[in-house]
Image (cartoon, rainbow, N blue to C red):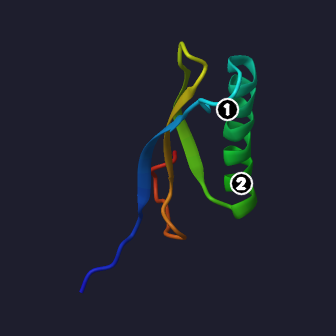
Amino acid sequence: MKRIKAACICQTIHFMLKEDTAHEEAVLLVKREVEQYKKRMEQNGTRYKIVEEMDQPDGSVLMKIIKQYNSSPVGSYLD
């Protein structure tokens, strides 16, 4: 028999600009979306670590994140 002792998921998320919106407004919307994403994880009690968050030349945001998978224990992944 086997049991999962710790589990996390590694993601690279690209928060992209909306094409049908003025550039300045689209950049603000992306920044807001990133903050809402972080807030939602906090509200849900999801443990996470942002490895890298990079603003792209076009104003979009690329985020590399390690986060808790479902409600699995995270072990030392987020240390």
* Residue 30 image label: 1
Q: Height in image: 13 above or below 70?
A: above
Q: Between disc 2 and disc 1, whose residue precedes?
A: 1
The percent coordinates of residue 15 (x first, y second) are 56, 35
Task: Specify the amino acid type for callout 1.
Answer: Val
Task: Specify the amino acid type for callout 2.
Answer: Arg
* Residue 40 image label: 2
Label 1 residue SS: helix
Q: Residue at x 75, y 24 (%)?
A: 25
Q: Nearer the viewer, residue 19 or 54?
A: 19
The percent coordinates of residue 54 (x first, y second) are 54, 23
Alpha-carbon neighbours of circle 2 within 10 Å: few (<14), some, or many (≥20)?
A: few
The percent coordinates of residue 47 (x first, y second) are 60, 55
Q: How many marks?
A: 2
* Residue 4 image label: none
Q: Residue furthest left?
A: 1
Q: Is residue 78 left or right of residue 41?
A: left
Label 2 residue SS: helix
Q: Residue at x 73, y 18 (%)?
A: 24
Q: Residue furthest bottom?
A: 1
Comparing marks 2 and 1, which lies closer to the viewer? 1
Alpha carbon distance from label 2 to label 1: 15 Å
